[in-house]
Image (cartoon, coloured by chain):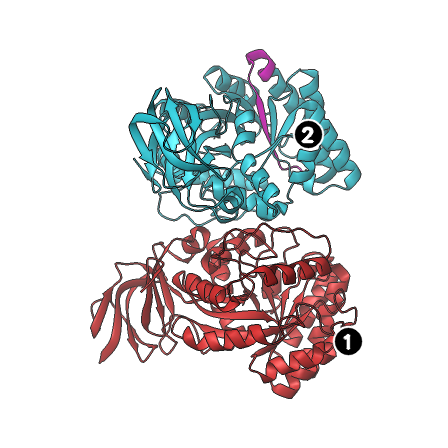
Chain colours: A red, B cyan
Amino acid sequence: MSFDLVLADLRIDGVAQDIGITQGRIACLAPPGTLTAAVVEPCGGLLALPGLVDGHIHLDKTFLGLPWIPHRPDDSIAGRIAAERAQRRAIAEPMALRARRLVEYIAQRGTTAIRTHVDIDADVGLAGLEALLKMRGEVAHLLDMQIVAFPQSGVVILSGGAALLEDAVRAGADVVGGLDPACIDEDVEGQLGIIFGIAERHGVPIDIHLHDPGELGAWELRRIAGRSKAAGMQGRVAVSHAYALGEVPEATLARTAAALAEGGVAIMTNGPGTAAMPPVQRLVAEGVTVFCGSDNIRDAWSPYGDGDMLRRAGVVGYRAGLVTDAELRLALDLVTLAPARVLGLPTQGLVEGAPADLVLVAAEGVAEAVATAPARALVVKAGRIIARGSVLA
Amino acid sequence: MSFDLVLADLRIDGVAQDIGITQGRIACLAPPGTLTAAVVEPCGGLLALPGLVDGHIHLDKTFLGLPWIPHRPDDSIAGRIAAERAQRRAIAEPMALRARRLVEYIAQRGTTAIRTHVDIDADVGLAGLEALLKMRGEVAHLLDMQIVAFPQSGVVILSGGAALLEDAVRAGADVVGGLDPACIDEDVEGQLGIIFGIAERHGVPIDIHLHDPGELGAWELRRIAGRSKAAGMQGRVAVSHAYALGEVPEATLARTAAALAEGGVAIMTNGPGTAAMPPVQRLVAEGVTVFCGSDNIRDAWSPYGDGDMLRRAGVVGYRAGLVTDAELRLALDLVTLAPARVLGLPTQGLVEGAPADLVLVAAEGVAEAVATAPARALVVKAGRIIARGSVLA
């Protein structure tokens, strides 16, 4: 059998392998030197990791590539949202250029699939969404892109907000988003009713930003889990951030984790710096899918963030206390297999039949790769080499 | 006037400058193109930062450069200390080689001065200290090194511990260390009495590891501050970690911060992942010197850590919520001027008369440099170029 491409002499879990790729998929794993192809890429014993999946990014928000824009602090969330809209208006460069630059930047670092949120509000309407939909085709060779219609300025409190959100889904958004039903909309059942209604009418998944604190946030998580179960949407609902899970007492955590598992609600964390950290291992042990994303990458919300999902696995592992080799492997799952499941991507991982999305690094094993985030030597997307040494091929 | 070396066309705080260096010091700052020297290094408009200072490192503990050693978890501190001693005995390579490798690694990344702790216990006795004292001379061209005699296995509970610690200071340790007077020694006044006694008899500063939690830890901080004031040691006592400051209620924090300021006790944080984060801005506002260090760099205590102090400034800034340009500048101070003061180094910073210790990066300004930790283009130690592109010159 001959292949389109053979990646020769790499390592998977300590075992030297060749990978034979055909039609964008991993067709065969075999001992080194046994596969032939028109194109053979010698991999020099580098460690292969599955393509990195960024489960939560905001392509439309980044300032990356612009002259430095100082962070403007604001004590209230509403104030920060307003400040961001003002900053956005002041940037001359079209959003699509910044977003495209960020896509190339993260693709070079091994990200082969993303779930990006895009602001849907009275200011931008569907313009951001439309720009990303257009750009998605142009970068399809670099990464898979799922787009969430994100009501950054609220749903219920925004006049026409519900209709705008549904228009976004009609216009092509893959996922319907939400935001702090209690503390932004001050109407939990109102916002959830709208979001689940759109999801059910259009058959799209849900991903809700939830920063609401403590017992309030945990209660909202249980309400979301209850609605997910009632709607038969298990596995298609995610909540991003959910700091509350790191804040509540044990009894509340246990009850909420059980509800999330039963409702099939996944939790996204980026390993926050100052906010409470959801207890990753505990949630996973309770049967909850946990996955990771970059969230902010040098934008109005944070000057930090680099879009490097292997480094993000390290940030989350550092914050969650993942230190043994098994725990560091879990951290890798949080940026590969887990978000791939949430995004509904085909079977992922370095197995025959999976899409040939992978990244090569100089590390002895997965634990070292997560703890040290070495440079990406080679990135392969759908069987094509798209970057070498963190530079697009 | 002619100089030994001119660094031509770099930027300091947004202003284009040349730096004229004579006898290892910054002799002159002047507009670009105005200084002459036998050796002129064109700097292409790169941003100059002061040499990075690692205020808390454990050169003797690192596994860096060895084959990957999986982390061995242990619920008790005593268990982890014992496990580390066992791991250390199992490593064939002499500690001095690992320590030397780490020194070169961090020097390439712009660290020009360190305070390293070295284990002093019944197992190793003074051997680790003696090895570092010998190595210090060999790497003096790369960085300044201050050595803390660190009683990793306790002081009071260790038979002969007090005498061993004093022997370490007699043998050349620059600073006397301590460790969790309550939870390791279970004798707060006993341990503090020994440490302050050694410090007063030998005229050395103090640096105490303190992981003891909550009100207990805060009370110990006040006891240390009280002893510092009574001994007239203000400015010569530091406490490393002090997680308690991130755990206690406001009233306790206020009282403890005031005591630390009055006692001249500095606080070292590495921006811990799972432990509570001391409130950096609050402490600084109360007049407490806060400084940073790497702490563990791939060792028995943590698989994380890379010794990169610019990245560490970002970790601490991320954990402490330092986001405005002024706050990001504070984060830089935590890895430059603040630890330089604690180490008692000569006037630091990019000013005439200061040692010519500096690092050049591609960044628009300090805020961007801290938030993104760009590669180190050039490192200068005592007026000599010691690394280019993170490779020793």
- Magenta segment boundaries in residue numbering: B198-213
Answer yes or no: are tags 2 and 1 on the same subunit. no
| Residue on which the image places disc 1 | A189
Amino acid type, label 1: Glu
Of the residues tagged 2 and 1, which is closer to the observer? Answer: 2
| Vertical arrangement, residue B148 with respect to residue A317, above or below | above
Residue A357 locus on image (x, y percent): 38, 71
Residue A161 locus on image (x, y percent): 71, 76
Query: Does residue A147 appear to the left or right of B172 in the view shown?
Result: right
Q: Are marks 2 and 1 in contact (CB under 8 Å)?
A: no
Quick check: can you spot residue B324? yes
Residue B287 is tagged as: 2
Residue B209 magenta-highlighted = yes
The residue that appears at 25% across and 77% down in the rendered structure is: A4
Local SS, label 2: loop
The residue that appears at 38% across and 26% down in the rendered structure is: B20
Query: Does residue B360 appear to the left or right of B184 in the view shown?
Result: left
